[in-house]
Amino acid sequence: MKRLVLTAAAALTLLLGGCATTIRSDVTTFHQWPSAPTDKTYVFEAPPAQDDTLELRSYQNLVRGELAKLGFQDAGANGKPTLTVAMRFSTADVPERVVMVADPFYLSGAQFGFYRGGYNRFWGSGYYSPFYDPFWYGRQSYRETVRHTYQRELQVAIKSAADGKRLFDVTVHNSSRQLSTPAVMPALVQSAFEGFPGPNGAARQVELKQNNG
């Protein structure tokens, strides 16, 4: 759904590279996890043919890595697992129309230290400026652009291979301006297993740092 957002372009924004980005995800878990499982072997459930992509398999490898940290073992194609693991993910692009409102006098004056109001070191407080033209007030220019927000959802379920009983369900929601899903998926998968099995029937926010290089 598109929304109209009005912002005032009154200052310059400096973008600093090489910083760590905080990835915040909303994580909800439900589980009936046994206190001391004796066998933690598993296989991934086969997804529908249309969903069996190389991208999905790549994310399965991320899940496999997190499970290994928790003592789970992939039984392989010929093994006899006690557990099955299912996963799915989705990404939705939510565009917003953004209208930038610019005052041409304010912007040009700001470059030289002259402002309509407030205080500056040349002219003190108030509205006085040798270049101030009262008839310029209200002569604003507009620039429209589209800003994209990407909403992602990751779901992972662990079930008993014997009877299909669900033992662990986790859902991870993340919203960001990052276009690339592969760039943020490692953090989403890690968030899914943070504090495994986690609180039962509760939602929490997990924050992880991602190095931008």
Image (cartoon, rainbow, N blue to C red):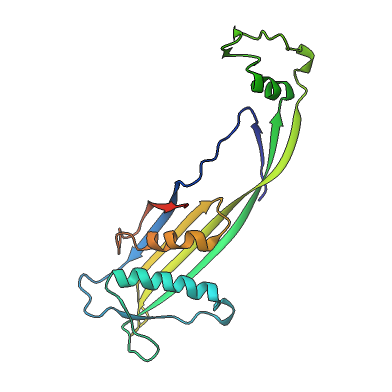
Q: Which residue is drawn at 67% across and 7% down?
A: 128
Toward which corner of the image does residue 202 lie, by quadrant?
A: bottom left
Q: Is residue 30 above or below residue 96?
A: below
On screen, residue 43 versus residue 8, left or right, reads left
User: Is 81 in front, or is 176?
Assistant: 176
On screen, residue 120 versus residue 184, left or right, reads right
Q: Is residue 101 above or below residue 86?
A: above
Q: In this view, does 82 lie above or below 207?
A: below
Query: Residue 84: x and y, percent?
Result: 38, 79
User: Is 14 in front, or is 161?
Assistant: 14
Residue at the limit of the structure toward the bottom, as seen here: 78
Toward which corner of the image does residue 85 lie, by quadrant?
A: bottom left
Asked whether residue 79 is in view, the answer is yes
Q: Residue at x 49, y 70 (%)?
A: 88
User: Is 118 in front, or is 131?
Assistant: 131
Q: Which residue is drawn at 33% across and 71% down?
A: 67
Query: Residue 93: x and y, percent?
Result: 62, 56
Query: Residue 180: x and y, percent?
Result: 56, 59
Asked whether residue 125 is in view, the answer is no
Q: How many marks?
A: 0
Q: In this view, does 126 lie above or below 155?
A: above
Query: Residue 46: x and y, percent?
Result: 48, 82
On screen, residue 106 versus residue 16, left or right, reads right
Q: Residue at x 55, y 36 (%)?
A: 14
